[in-house]
Image (cartoon, helix red, strand yellow):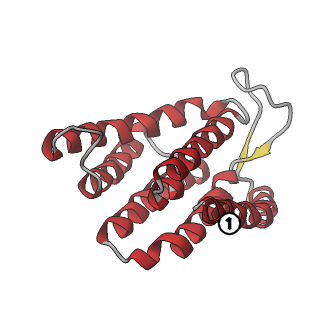
């Protein structure tokens, strides 16, 4: 199990490593940049497309390791993740109103809650609502802390490593894939 997790992480890392420079080049070419301002600490424009490399790496790794299960739950999870990723990318490139982002996030949260309607010992109906709210709140929390360079990426890395450790401890490939 631990070797599978390490291979999964290595594949994601290698893909992200090679895709990141490509997304950076596209960002500068198409001027998809985050410019310095009073509330941002960077001194020069930086690319806003770093999430694309992470999404590509995650999706490829997830498909390689989880799609063989061929459960509708896995497909719904991937669909929810794609909706969240596309929402973030669209916001970075074109900009979105808060209502547009919230609506797209709510669709993804609903899909996720349909696939995984439980947290611990909550019943399916009540748990699905809790899962829906949790996903929606986490999406918006990450969106709010995204203004400080590296903070969202750092917290996401810590969360991902925590999921890997929990997945290894529980022998659950799906938790590792999150």
Q: Nearer the viewer, residue 64 or 165?
A: 165
Q: Position of residue 92 (x, y in %)?
A: 60, 49
Residue beneath label 1, please? Answer: 7
Residue at image position (48%, 45%) is: 96
| Count of numbered circles on the image | 1
Residue at image position (72%, 63%) is: 10
Q: Nearer the viewer, residue 96 or 65?
A: 65
Q: Position of residue 159 (x, y in %)?
A: 57, 40
Q: Nearer the viewer, residue 125 or 109?
A: 125
Q: Position of residue 170 (x, y in %)?
A: 46, 50
Please give left or right for residue 76 compared with residue 57 in the image: left
Residue at image position (75%, 66%) is: 19
* For residue 46, above or below residue 16: above
Residue at image position (79%, 66%) is: 18
Please give left or right for residue 133 compared with residue 24 in the image: left
Which residue of the protein is positioned furthest toward the top in this rendering?
38
Residue 27 occupies which quadrant of the picture?
A: bottom right
> 10 Å neighbourhood of mark 1: few (<14), some, or many (≥20)?
some
* For residue 116, above or below residue 155: below
Report helix, strand or loop for mark 1.
helix
Question: Looking at the figure, which quarter contains the N terminus?
Answer: bottom right
Q: Nearer the viewer, residue 27 or 31?
A: 27
Q: Position of residue 45 (x, y in %)?
A: 81, 41
Please give left or right for residue 176 compared with residue 100 in the image: right
Residue 78 occupies which quadrant of the picture?
A: bottom left
């Amino acid at each position: 199990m631990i070797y599978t997790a390490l291979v999964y992480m290595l594949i994601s890392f290698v893909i992200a490593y090679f895709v990141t420079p490509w997304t950076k080049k596209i960002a500068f070419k198409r001027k998809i940049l985050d410019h310095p301002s009073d509330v941002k600490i960077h001194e020069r424009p930086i690319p806003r497309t770093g999430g694309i490399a992470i999404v590509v790496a995650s999706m490829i790794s997830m498909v390689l390791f989880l799609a063989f299960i061929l459960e509708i739950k896995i497909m719904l999870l991937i669909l929810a993740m794609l909706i969240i990723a596309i929402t973030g990318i669209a916001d970075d490139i074109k900009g979105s109103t808060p209502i547009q982002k919230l609506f797209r996030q709510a669709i993804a949260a609903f899909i996720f809650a349909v696939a995984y309607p439980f947290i611990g010992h909550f019943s399916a109906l009540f748990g699905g609502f809790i899962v829906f709210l949790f996903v929606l709140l986490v999406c918006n929390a990450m969106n709010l802390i995204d203004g400080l360079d590296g903070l969202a990426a750092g917290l996401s890395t810590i969360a991902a490593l925590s999921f890997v450790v929990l997945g290894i401890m529980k022998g659950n490939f799906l938790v590792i894939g999150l």
